[in-house]
Image: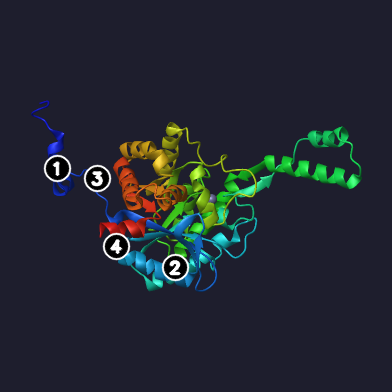
């Protein structure tokens, strides 16, 4: 039947009718709230590029967790800012690591809340990469030597400075993120987090084989009931910018394109997800959300596992920045962005808006 018998506007006439025929419903129980835990006491330090999001000391994280739960949001994901960083990410897997401390405290004070532990090494590495870095010696200093020859240096010191700079640059272009050795640290981190009270292990590093390595380590430690939520399709994205301030995890050199995915690749994303399922992932995630809604939809169509999507810091920061300029209606855009992620097929949404959206929905 076509117009005039069919009039699609009939069902849009009132708010009640629109609500009755709504195809996508948001509820707070699909939200996960990300929290950044830092050392100290009584610390609530707002992240400059993420208004309303704070670095929280353990005591403040407990308060925040209680508020999250009171709003009907069932889960938080924890990220850590250690007081010291090194080349083997000790802070990630130490039993008294910052996330381990937070997990113990929150489990004790807010027992019903589901604790997800992000597993990655970048926040704990002095160089800010997600794995162990092996500097590869440059094959030749030829270019650098030529600099010395080409330029007329007044003094030797200047020449040495120039050569050192060039050599450093070459070394930084020639590093490698070592996959298999990194797996050992990720597995160790996962066991340590689960023992501290983390309910769900969520590896976000994008090393090959990490889900299998983590599953094996958890099982060997008797943690057979700890599920893995794999950041299965995590794209190298400019939308992570504000997070790196929040978690103090910007790489000191290079970028993450040798392990995170190329945003152009849908088919590869499906292979990544398949591989993680094969290795034992219980849930899968696509990250970021809004620029990758098609990837979420395709993953939803293909795979039967619970599917999560991460509305990342840059997505949040863009909405916040535009709203501050009164260029958009903040609440409306917030809810619309969350509905779009749900509609694409994500049943779990990690979002900095978890608390606020829960308030709107409540
Ligand atoms: Zn990382």
Callout 1 secondary element: loop
The C terminus: image quadrant: bottom left
Instruction: Residue 112: give its label.
Output: none
Nearer to us of marks 4 and 1 is 1
Question: How far apart are labels 1 and 3 at the CA level?
Answer: 18 Å
3D distance between C-alphas at marks 4 and 1: 31 Å
Q: Where is residue 97 in the image (x, y as percent from the top left)?
A: 54, 65
Classify mark 3: helix, strand or loop: loop
Find residue 13 and name its label.
Answer: 1
- Which of discs 1 and 3 lies nearer the camera? The answer is 1
Is 202 in front, or is 356? 356
- Crowding near the residue tagged with mark 1, few <14, some 14–19, many ≥20 C-alpha atoms within 10 Å: few
How many residues crowd mark 2 within 10 Å: few (<14), some (14–19), many (20+)? many
Mark 2 and mark 3: span between their CA atoms?
A: 32 Å
Residue behind mark 4: 72
Task: Tell us which disc is closer to us: 1 or 2.
Answer: 1
The Cα–Cα distance between marks 4 and 3, rounded to whole angstroms, is 19 Å
| Residue for badge 2 | 61
Specify whether residue 157 is in view. yes
Colour scheme of the rendered structure: rainbow
Of pointers 1 and 2, the one earlier in the residue sequence: 1
Nearest to N terminus: mark 2 or mark 3? 3
| Residue sitting at x 28%, y 57% | 360
């Amino acid at each position: 039947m076509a117009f005039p018998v069919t009039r699609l506007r009939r069902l849009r006439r009132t708010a009640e009718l629109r609500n009755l025929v709504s195809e996508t419903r948001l509820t707070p129980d699909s939200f996960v709230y990300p929290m950044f835990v830092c050392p100290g006491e009584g610390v609530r330090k707002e992240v400059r590029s993420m208004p309303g999001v704070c670095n929280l000391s353990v005591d403040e994280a407990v308060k925040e967790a209680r508020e999250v739960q009171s709003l009907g949001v069932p889960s938080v994901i924890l990220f850590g800012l250690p007081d010291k960083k090194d080349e083997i990410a000790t802070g990630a897997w130490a039993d008294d690591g910052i996330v381990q401390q937070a997990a113990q405290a929150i489990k004790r004070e807010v027992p019903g809340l589901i604790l997800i532990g992000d597993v990655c090494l970048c926040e704990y590495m002095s160089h800010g990469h997600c794995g162990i870095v092996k500097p590869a010696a440059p094959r030749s200093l030829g270019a650098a030597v030529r600099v010395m020859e080409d330029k007329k240096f007044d003094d030797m010191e200047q020449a040495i400075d120039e050569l050192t700079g060039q050599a450093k640059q070459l070394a930084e272009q020639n590093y490698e993120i070592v996959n298999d050795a990194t797996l050992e640290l990720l597995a160790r981190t996962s066991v340590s987090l689960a023992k501290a009270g983390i309910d769900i292990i969520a590896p976000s590093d994008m090393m090959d084989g990490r889900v299998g390595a983590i599953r094996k380590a958890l099982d060997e430690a008797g943690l057979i009931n700890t599920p893995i939520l794999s950041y299965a399709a995590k794209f190298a994205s400019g939308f992570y910018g504000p997070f790196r301030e929040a978690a103090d995890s910007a790489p000191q050199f290079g970028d993450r394109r040798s392990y995170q995915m190329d945003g152009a690749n849908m088919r590869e994303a499906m292979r990544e997800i398949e591989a993680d399922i094969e290795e034992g992932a219980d849930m899968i995630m696509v990250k970021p959300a809004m620029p990758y809604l098609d990837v979420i939809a395709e993953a939803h169509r293909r795979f039967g596992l619970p599917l999560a999507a991460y509305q990342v810091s840059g997505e949040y920061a863009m909405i916040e920045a535009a709203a501050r300029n009164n260029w958009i209606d903040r609440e409306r855009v917030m809810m619309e962005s969350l509905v779009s992620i749900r509609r694409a097929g994500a049943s779990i949404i990690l979002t900095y808006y978890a608390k606020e959206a829960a308030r709107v929905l409540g």
